[in-house]
Amino acid sequence: MAGRGMTGVYGPGLSRRSLLKGMAAGAGAMAAGPLFSGSAFAAREKELNILCWEGYNSAQVLDPFRAKTGATVKAESLTNDPTMINRLRAGEINTWDLINVNNPWARKVMLPEKLIKPLPKEQFEPFFAKMLPSFKWPYKWAMSDDGSELIGMVQRFGPYSFVVNTDKISRKTAEDTGWNLFNDPALAGKYGILESDDWNVFGIFIVAGIDPFKVHTPEEMATFDETAKRVFKGAKLIGDIASMNQALISGEIDLHLTGGTYSVSPARADGHPNLRAITPLKGPLTGGKGGISWIEVTSTVNNPQLSPLALDFLKYVQAPEVAHTVAFAEGTFNPVAQMGNPDCFKLFTKEELDAIQWDSLEEEMARSVEYDIVPDYDKALDIMNAAKRLRG
Amino acid sequence: MADLAHTETQPRALAHAPEGMDGVRHARRLSVGARCALPVAVLLGLGFLAPLVAILAYSFATPRSFDVFRSFTLANFATLFDPSNTVWVSFVWSCGFALFTVALLAVIAYPIAYGLNMVFGRYAGFVSVLFVFPLFVSENVRLYGWVLFFIKNGVLDGTLKWLGLPGGPEVLYTPGITLFGMLYTYLPFMLFPMTLGLALVPRDLVDAARDLGAGRLFIWREIELPLAMPGILIGMLLTFVLAIGATAEAKILGGQSVIVISHDIEIAFTYSQNWPLGSALAVVVTAFIGVLILYVLSRLDLDRMLGRR
């Protein structure tokens, strides 16, 4: 990439346009600087670059792979899907080998935009047989829209609606009342909002009694606006996962949206089983469901010089021990599809199963619709950001 | 005589000519050191310019696109200046926080700076280290530390309750605590330029004024303050520029009770995925700060500040 930028600057037929293009490429190369340890044109047998949610970038997961292959493995973690996908759109397709995002992006966005490429089915289909029953082949989110191609491998997943302190609001009350808790004036000032804005768009729509995953009418958008202003005004704080868990433990707040196993599991593992991810019994989502779940899909980037290690890594994380490590990598703890394999499941201790709410996981997943793309997300997000500014 | 003088000067002039041209050529040619440093200088120059050029170019790109250098539109700026856009609220908060931080820090840091120069004597170095030391710890870690201090059942609240008192005040997640966090974070940036400014005040002048019967207030107003002013202004400027771009305090301590302008820029680049709008916002804020700095610097006498006069 750096090489190409230089050609743009010094090559024949220098024009303002080519100069600017060269500078743009150069700027891009500089932004991705740390990743370019050697020549961009060298063979990539010994390097692998992973763009992922946190966990896959941890030393516990990567070090054994590094030791096994002797490769330079670099992973960058981000905590929202659109940013990762836009990194590819902005030209980093030549940088990354693997991208790990939530379920709909691979089949609905990245494959049509040719940002990722299919996996060799014959090599990966057997892994699905050992996954939990809901992930059996052909698993929807791992396949292309027409079902002909395998476009990614699945591993971590979980329900993601909201989290309560069951000492203050019982699990039953929370599940029965559902998202209406956030419409209760008595709870104003007692809840937090996790800074996860794409999920908060879903949450605010559901609090407003509207299915987020459809095109919305102006009236629905007006209701969304009113709800967003009220919910954000009533929030005690907005913050990251650590802030939410800390505020729950200290008693600053009794509940927070959006959240789930992913966000509360570290606090549960830390000795706070009273904090619990809740999936409401009912709600405005398809089939009267009240919860949303996510499933990560890891795909190979449509990199013209894809590292051969990308496929090796996808196979490596399917191994029971590694899958267990991924589930309990640093940061957040999550169930993994590979728990369907008894060899993997037996590695989980009772405490670990309790941290990820294994007791109710199946029913909570059943009560949830799967994360999808909001067609008018941009508009909703703008409304939500404006609502946030009115907090002060 | 005149002819003689002319013929005398002519050869000298001719003799000088090649030497003069050589001198010009020599001056044009860079020294060996400069030539060796050139690649690094170019790299540093590009490293400085490339992000700025990219941001500027993005601010004129089609909204929510990556068509940088391929499209030109003022739509992003139009969006920012649209009366219905509430981004000005964030801007006002940032400016307000920055102004209050500067004003309060000037009052807080002055006595400390005075102490470092005139009072603490041989302990001045140690006191300076105490103020510098926190800078070795990540700002976020320090701010999370304050959260643990102020949080319900945290260090303050828990200790007061343990002592049988009613408990600590509920200060977290408010604009007030955000301001506190900024005062805490930026104190060294005000303190050290101010200390340097006060160090430039000649003691003889103060002594002379005192001998001539000037009172303490008079000496402070007429001698210390004007002579230390360049340092004080640099401290204020530095603090203001840093504070207007501050975001961690409002996020971690303030719980986003208000959204500051740098957070709005961050949102545009992340969740909104509107790099052109984020860039336009960054350009507007940078231009605002740039104009402000140029204005203040134009009023400052750099020579005097550096003690050259």
Image: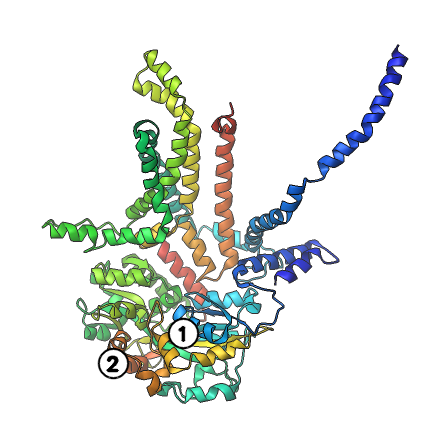
- In this view, the mark in front (2 or 1): 2
Q: Residue A247: x, y in percent?
A: 25, 60
Q: Residue A124: x, y in percent?
A: 48, 85
Residue beneath the point at 14% across and 49% down = B160
Neighbours of disc 1 within 10 Å: few (<14), some (14-19), many (20+): some
Q: Residue A160: x, y in percent?
A: 33, 72
Residue B24 horizontal side relative to residue B160, left or right: right
Asked whether residue A391 is in view, the answer is no
Count the marks: how many?
A: 2
Foreground residue, A243 or B64? Answer: A243
Tell me the SS state at disc 1. Answer: loop
Residue A159 horizontal side relative to residue A19, left or right: left
Foreground residue, A194 or A273? Answer: A273
Can you identify the residue that label 1 sits on?
A213
Which amino acid lies under the numbered mark 2 shown in the image of this protein? Asp
Can you identify the residue that label 2 sits on?
A359
Which amino acid lies under the numbered mark 1 shown in the image of this protein? Phe
Neighbours of disc 2 within 10 Å: few (<14), some (14-19), many (20+): few
Foreground residue, B238 or A322? Answer: A322
Q: Residue furthest left?
A: B164
Image mark 1: chain:
A
Tell me the SS state at disc 2. Answer: helix
Q: Residue A89: x, y in percent?
A: 54, 67
Could you say which disc has been placed on residue A68 in the image? none
Image mark 2: chain:
A
Location of residue A282 (image quadrant) = bottom left
Residue beneath the point at 17% across and 66% down = A168
For the residues labelled 2 and 1, the Cα–Cα distance comes to 29 Å
Residue beneath the point at 44% across and 34% down = B234
Residue B131 lies, with reference to residue A49, above or below; the image says above
